[in-house]
Image (cartoon, rainbow, N blue to C red):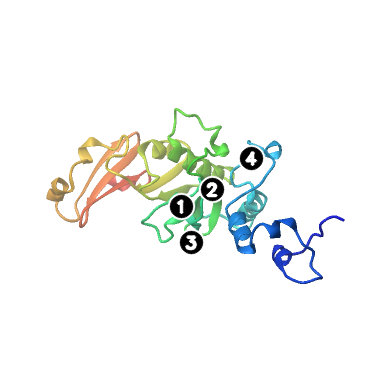
Amino acid sequence: MGIVRLPRTELYWKQGGIWPLHPVTQHMSLLRWQQIKRFIKISNPKEEKTQDKWYKKVEPLLSKVSAAFKRHWILSSNCTIDEMMIRFSGRSEHTHRIRSKPIPEGYEVLSLCDICAYAWVLLPISRSEYEAELEDIPEEKFNLTEKRCWHIIRQILTEEKREFTVYMDIRFSSVNLFSFLRKNGIGAVGTVRENSKMYPISLKGRDGERKRLGWGNIESSVVKDVLAIIWIDYGPVRLLTTRHHDLW
């Protein structure tokens, strides 16, 4: 007589004459079984598909949700790129840790959002794996962050012919990306790091050196048709833009 399959694993350890006995219950307690099951995955290596995405378990739902986001919302001319964190503190090679975020650890998702914070495009990114969606973007044009941004932004090019401006923070902004977006008819505005590649040398310098400009003053320089700006607030604020032509 074979072992009867019960609806819940805990029932195999339940004492009583009406419950079938499983051999594993003679060698370990229920608590030990639950501890092992929590941290182990058993699968057949022959059935594992290496070409699958690392988030394949949520991929069918993610694709349907992403398609619905686009279908039920008309994107405005002003949108933004930013990251979202899905809280997870377990063991995974795909999670990120950003201590300055409200959710410091978890799965990271890049998103193109409308100016009202409606998520229009989603891209889960891994700490250890390369996104298959980026394979058609030439290596010589972009670094990894710029590739991810362009993959998200180029999806708005399928919309009707309209002007778009994408706002982004210091993590994504670069002269190379902004120049490329400008050539493709998409405006971009964002803060930028001082050590960002191709950022004008004339606007670099230690914070103390830039404060000599005085509070509220602005200096600018153009590189590859991108306007780089330094504005003195309580400290230097560095910006890149392809939209604010009155500052050229």
* SS assignment at label 1: strand
Kind of residue at badge 2: Pro
Q: Is residue 114 left or right of residue 201?
A: right
Mark 3 and mark 4: Cα distance apart in space: 34 Å
Which numbered disc, 4 or 2, marks the residue closer to the eye?
4
Is residue 27 among what the camera can see?
yes
* SS assignment at label 4: loop
- Residue 83, numbered circle: 1
Which numbered disc, 1 or 4, marks the residue closer to the eye?
4
Kind of residue at badge 3: Cys
Mark 4 and mark 2: Cα distance apart in space: 14 Å
Is tag 3's residue or tag 4's residue first in the polypeptide sequence?
A: 4
Identity of the residue drawn at 28% across and 39% down: 195
What residue sits right under mark 2 in the picture? 124
Instruction: Give the x, y percent position of residue 6.
Output: 78, 63
- Residue 52, numbered circle: 4
Q: Are marks 1 and 2 in contact (CB under 8 Å)?
A: no
Is tag 2's residue or tag 3's residue first in the polypeptide sequence?
A: 3
Front-lying residue, 4 or 195: 4
Identity of the residue drawn at 58% across and 44% down: 54
Kind of residue at badge 4: Asp
- Image quarter of residue 136: top right
